[in-house]
Image (cartoon, rainbow, N blue to C red):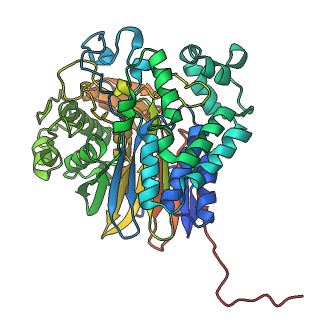
Amino acid sequence: MPSTHPADGATRFDCEKQPARGSQAMIVTNHPRASAAGAEVLLAGGNAVDAAVTALFALSVVEPMMVGVLGGGVAHVRRADGANVIVDGLSTAPQLASGTMYETVSDELATYRETRGRANLVGGLAVAVPGALAAWCKALADHGTISVAEAVEPATRLADRGFTVTPYLVDCVRDTADDLARDPGLRALFLPAGAPLAAGTTLRQPAYAETLDTIGRDGPAALYGGGLGRAFLRAVADDGGIMTDGDLAAYEPVDRHPIRGSYRGYEVLGPPPPASAGVHITQMLNLLEGFDLRALGFGTPESTHLLAEALKIAFADRSVATADPAFVDVPVERLVSKAYAEEQAATIDPEATRAWGPGVHGDAHSTTHVTAADAAGNVMTTTQTINGLFGACLQVPETGMIANNYMYNFDPHPGHALSVEPGKRVFTSMAPMMVCRDGEIRYALGLPGALRIFPSAFQALVNLIDHGMTLQEAVEAPRIWTEGGVVEIENAFPESVESGLVDRGHEVQRVGRVAGGMNAIAFEDDGSLTGAACWRADGTPVAIAGGLAREGVRFSGL
């Protein structure tokens, strides 16, 4: 566990990974080959958006369980002129979907999302209209400098020539082996001879390489109206799905303004609804602003209790209020106001937990993340997913594309803010966050982890701002999570924290990890960049320094 630095009161502890530091550019992804693909683009003169989108295409090859062109996600772009934009590429419910399309199991919290036959989790009825490819291409067209063909080229090489399978990928295959086995293409690719492929072997995906070539040639039209789209719709229909060509034709990514909050002199920017992060991270930071967290210390019973209470309050409001703003009137101004936070904070008991209900009224599991920055000041932090491990466990024959299971994100019960409605965007916990001070960007970060994403990003921000951690320490520090019931704490917390939470009335469960591998970039006072990735994934930062020769220099040697 960490210790307190006597000079500045900041928290310090040993980390498993080391950060990277450079003066020109930085790319951090959750796989070394994807980081290499992004770095290749930066070294060739591309900007941060070019690198991030290129890395996403590469991740669709090397992290096929996490991300793909048939998924969805949220990108947060900061242009060199200081403007921020959120590119919403979240999936939507098909037009034939309805609030009663699934038969639910119960109203209990632990099984609330479950449906008969797991229809919202595996197979054709679990598939939502994909937004990833459209959004990646939009970000590239609006903010990048290279073509789609150039962006897919490193990924095409990886798919064609293959890459070395990591233990992390093998663990994901093992965890979903039964569902993978139901699909002939996935079974052949990931369960050769009936067992998970072995770490250290080479995985080639020639059919997906051809798909990427098609995307490079035709752009998003290959899926939205083209041959790839027709193949996708046939596969979904053959597996019981209800998507039509009209769903693909109608899909468009949406540019949104970020939510802007303030915390101890910093400006915190995150995605707005239907994403939870901007609203509820701002809400939780507002709640904690009246408490001296640095004095309480990181990982103490007192500070951890406050984090848990803030999470419980935010999740109570999220359950009724944060959804697609085209369908639900989200009370954003109320949720992010300092006055509302003061009302809620005044009811927090430092010595005891309580049951929290919503203070406002309205009515995935597996993901990946990329953070990139260039020397000109462009930054992109983006979270993307096919939702569950290997999505709906449905591969489109002869294309290598894996369908999402984003319908699982909806409330399967009708009549609620988060219930299924035709054309409704899924809500998400994705948290591609940026932090500024005096108008200058200081941090960009994000991570995978379904409902645990924005609570983990929130804790990283507290680690940086309140506890004075380095970037590496902030992304690796032990995390907690709760949505109102059991408080999960990672195993690195000492027994004193567990017993202190129990004494305050919390039900506590120790877990190996909370959420997935965070990656982040810090923008240092001297103009350099620090990149960090944590132990929870295969994350790898690549820093770029150096540059071209001094102008006018000529070689005069032998």
Q: Quadrant of residue 405?
A: top left
Look at 20% across and 50% down and name the residue there: 286
Look at 34% across and 46% down and name the residue there: 458
Q: Which residue is farthest right?
A: 558
- Please determine whether, in this image, residue 182 is positioned above or below residue 367: above
- Please determine whether, in this image, residue 226 is positioned above or below residue 239: below
Residue 63 image offset from top left, x and y in percent: 58, 36
Residue 257 image offset from top left, x and y in percent: 27, 54
Q: Quadrant of residue 505?
A: top left
Look at 37% across and 70% down and name the residue there: 81
Q: How many marks?
A: 0
Residue 260 image offset from top left, x and y in percent: 25, 56
Query: Split into 4 quadrants, where in the image is the C terminus?
Result: bottom right
Q: Is residue 82 visible?
A: yes
Q: Is residue 448 visible?
A: no
Lateral position of residue 401 relative to residue 442, left or right? right
In this orientation, which residue lies closer to the viewer: 420 or 435?
420
- Please determine whether, in this image, residue 239 is positioned above or below residue 306: above
Residue 302 image offset from top left, x and y in percent: 28, 40
Lateral position of residue 177 relative to residue 99, left or right? right
Lateral position of residue 350 relative to residue 69, left or right? left
In this orientation, which residue lies closer to the viewer: 456 or 545?
545
In this orientation, which residue lies closer to the viewer: 25 or 311?
25
- Please determine whether, in this image, residue 216 is positioned above or below residue 443: above
